[in-house]
């Protein structure tokens, strides 16, 4: 890597994703993090000044705050490239969806983009499972998809983290998004290729980080009749060469018959697993909701936008040469 440092500003570094980004980028030798005084961090003028000085600015803010600062950047004519970690722009045609594995050309689109929206954690796993099935003609777009997503409580942000930290009793897993109006559903339906509403059951559990997204499938409803092993081969070919996605051969996902949701905590890669049998199949994605589901995905996008190898500085099972 060259000796030049990339100037980066994180707007909203006090939140979970912002803090993770700050910690990780501060440890890299190729980035210079632009600071803002504590008493100026909510001042629009001071924030715009820092954004203008940066090569890339991360927006780690609530949706409305992201919309406001992005509009101010545009109105000011500032040319800084933006990476947004909120829900605000994920389906906006003016922003590129920050999932490099989405299509064969998505990495190039992110590399050239001035505005990139980081995907939602739950959405990442489902899209990486459902889209290849639809594209390959295994199922029709109107297949009645449903999925469960088990996540650690860090996915709920600082308020939920504090709530779990204050209580010593063990809490049972809790399903939420009960009205089927979860904020990730618009991007799920926009980028998965699903032509029918997706039934989504998110579940938060009493561990810090890690995620397991499970998509059940009935082979009798397949348009293209593939067995479990053949599905594995389809996905292995689809994600060949993708440094952050590992497709696991059936039968190698577990040694004890259990599938822990936090097995990839602390990492930035994602596993796709094939469970069940030829008639009743579950395809699962396992990753860290704070890694490939948040800050790791944001850094992956930043790397592409800076012309770096996309896995540079990321924490993978197989360490990337840096």
Image (tube, grey):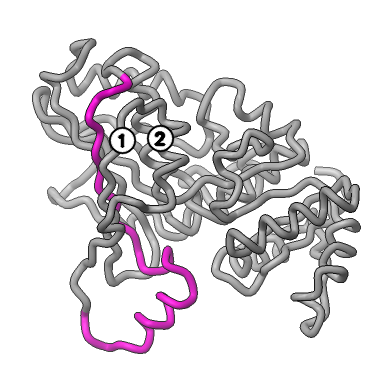
Q: The C terminus lies in which quarter of the figure?
A: top right
| SS type, badge 2 | helix
Q: Give the mark, 2 or 1, whose residue is nearer the N terminus.
A: 2
Q: Nearer the viewer, residue 281 or 186?
A: 186
Classify residue 214 by image quadrant.
Answer: top left
Sort mark 2 into few (<14), some (14-19) or many (20+) by Cα contacts within 10 Å.
some
Inter-mark Cα distance, 2 to 1? 7 Å
Residue 314 to residue 220: above or below: below
Kind of element beneath mark 1: loop
In the image: residue 32, left or right of residue 277: right
Q: Percent from the top left, x then y, of residue 235?
A: 36, 24
Taking the spot 49% from the left edge, 43% from the top edge, the residue there is 318
Which residue lies under the disc numbered 2? 189
Magenta region: which residues?
A: 141-170
Residue 216 image position (x, y, % from top left): 19, 36
Q: Is residue 35 left or right of residue 93?
A: right
Q: Which quadrant of the figure has residue 113? A: top right
Q: Is residue 52 above or below residue 108?
A: below
* Residue on which disc 1 sits: 197
In this rendering, position of residue 177 left or right of residue 221: right
Quarter of the image where one finds residue 232: top left
Number of numbered discs visible in the structure rendering = 2
Kindly check if marks 2 and 1 are in contact, taking CB atoms under 8 A apart as contact.
Answer: yes
């Amino acid at each position: 890597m060259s000796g030049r440092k990339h100037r980066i500003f994180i707007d909203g570094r006090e939140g979970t994703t912002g803090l993770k980004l700050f910690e990780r980028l501060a440890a890299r030798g190729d980035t210079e993090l632009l600071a803002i005084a504590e008493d100026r961090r909510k001042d629009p003028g001071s924030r715009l000044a820092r954004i203008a000085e940066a090569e890339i600015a991360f927006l780690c803010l609530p949706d409305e705050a992201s919309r406001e600062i992005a509009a101010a950047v545009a109105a000011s004519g500032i040319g800084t490239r933006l990476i947004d970690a909120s829900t605000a722009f994920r389906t906006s045609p003016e922003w590129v969806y920050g999932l490099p594995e989405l299509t064969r050309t998505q990495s190039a689109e992110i590399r050239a983009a001035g505005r990139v929206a980081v995907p939602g954690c739950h959405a990442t796993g489902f899209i990486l499972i459902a889209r290849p099935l639809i594209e390959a003609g295994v199922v029709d777009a109107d297949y009645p998809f449903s999925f469960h997503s088990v996540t650690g409580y860090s996915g709920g942000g600082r308020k939920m983290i504090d709530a779990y930290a204050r209580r010593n009793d063990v809490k049972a897993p809790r399903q939420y998004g009960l009205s089927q109006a979860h904020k990730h559903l618009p991007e799920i339906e926009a980028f998965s290729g699903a032509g029918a509403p997706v039934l989504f059951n998110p579940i938060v559990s009493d561990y810090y980080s890690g995620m397991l997204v499970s998509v059940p499938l009935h082979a009798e409803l397949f348009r293209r009749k593939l067995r479990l092993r053949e599905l594995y081969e389809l996905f292995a070919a689809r994600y060949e060469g993708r440094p952050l996605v590992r497709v696991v051969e059936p039968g190698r996902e577990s040694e004890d018959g259990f599938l822990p949701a936090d097995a990839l905590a602390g990492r930035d890669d994602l596993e796709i697993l094939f469970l069940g049998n030829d008639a009743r199949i579950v395809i699962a994605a396992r990753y860290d909701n704070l890694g490939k589901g948040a800050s790791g995905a944001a850094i992956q996008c930043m790397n592409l936008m800076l012309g770096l190898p996309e896995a540079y500085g990321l924490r993978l099972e197989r360490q990337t040469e840096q």
